[in-house]
Amino acid sequence: MHTGLLSIQGTAIVRVEPDLALIRLAVSRTAPALADAFSRVRTAAQNVRAFLIASGNGEIRSSRIALHQSGIRPPPYAMEGGYVATVNFSCVVIDLEAVESVLTGVVSSGANRLTAIEFLTSNLQAARIEARRRAVLVAQEKANFYCEALGARLGEVVNISEGDFDASPRQSEHGQSTAAAADSDEKLGTFSPSSIPVGATVNLQFRLL
């Protein structure tokens, strides 16, 4: 008769296709006079905002004007000192097919710095719930396997906790990515490279009978 506890960890991944894009950009202008730097960046930022609103995108956010003074370099790399004024923008594009035209438009409107483009999903909460459900099933399946191999009987769950899931694309010793090597039924090569991995890890502790 086996008595004691069995601790099992289950990990699962759900992959979802992105349906949103978050674009981060900036409008920056330099001028010898402080007032001119403010004026130039304000005009350019208004043009960029007007374009984003007209293009029918989602949430648009912008920062207050940030300011710093550019350095003055001595010869032979002489550079005239001045003031750099910057306004940062973030914009959610709800139509992925429009990302290219939005980028082209904001540059034409006055943006001169592209900070980042992130592809996101509006179904994140549902994907997390499904990943947690699969992780529990995986842990239960592993527990049953070990009990069968040991000739033990699986009892009730006495403890459950959520572990940390890391979806970073580190490589395992076999060359397989960490995310693709999870316990779930995801297999390498069966998902789109653009898909977003949403994972969950659960720790279950069973009583052995």
Image (cartoon, rainbow, N blue to C red):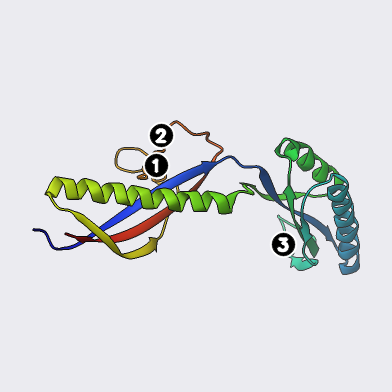
Q: In this view, does 9 lie to the left or right of 95?
A: left
Distance, label 1 to label 2, CA atoms, is: 9 Å
Distance, label 1 to label 3, CA atoms, is: 50 Å
Pointer 1: residues within 10 angstroms few (<14), some, or many (20+)? some
What residue is shown at x 38% (from left), y 43% (from top)?
184
Q: In this view, does 180 lie to the left or right of 142?
A: right
Residue 74: give its label: 3
SS assignment at label 1: loop
Q: What residue type is labelled 1?
A: Ser
The quadrant of the image that shows the N terminus is bottom left
User: Could you say where residue 84 lies in the image, as x and y percent from the top left?
Assistant: 79, 62
Pointer 3: residues within 10 angstroms few (<14), some, or many (20+)? few
Residue 177: give its label: 1
User: Could you say where residue 136 lies in the image, as x and y percent from the top left?
Assistant: 38, 53
What residue is shown at x 89% (from left), y 58% (from top)?
40
Q: Which numbered disc, 1 or 3, marks the residue closer to the eye? A: 1
Distance, label 2 to label 3, CA atoms, is: 56 Å
Q: Which amino acid does label 3 sit on?
A: Pro
SS assignment at label 2: loop
Q: Which amino acid does label 2 sit on?
A: Leu
Quadrant hosting residue 188: top left
Q: Which numbered disc, 2 or 3, marks the residue closer to the eye? A: 2
Count of numbered badges drawn on the protein: 3
- The foreground one among 7 and 188 is 7
Q: Is residue 7 left or right of residue 117?
A: left
Q: Which of marks 1 and 2 is nearer the N terminus?
A: 1
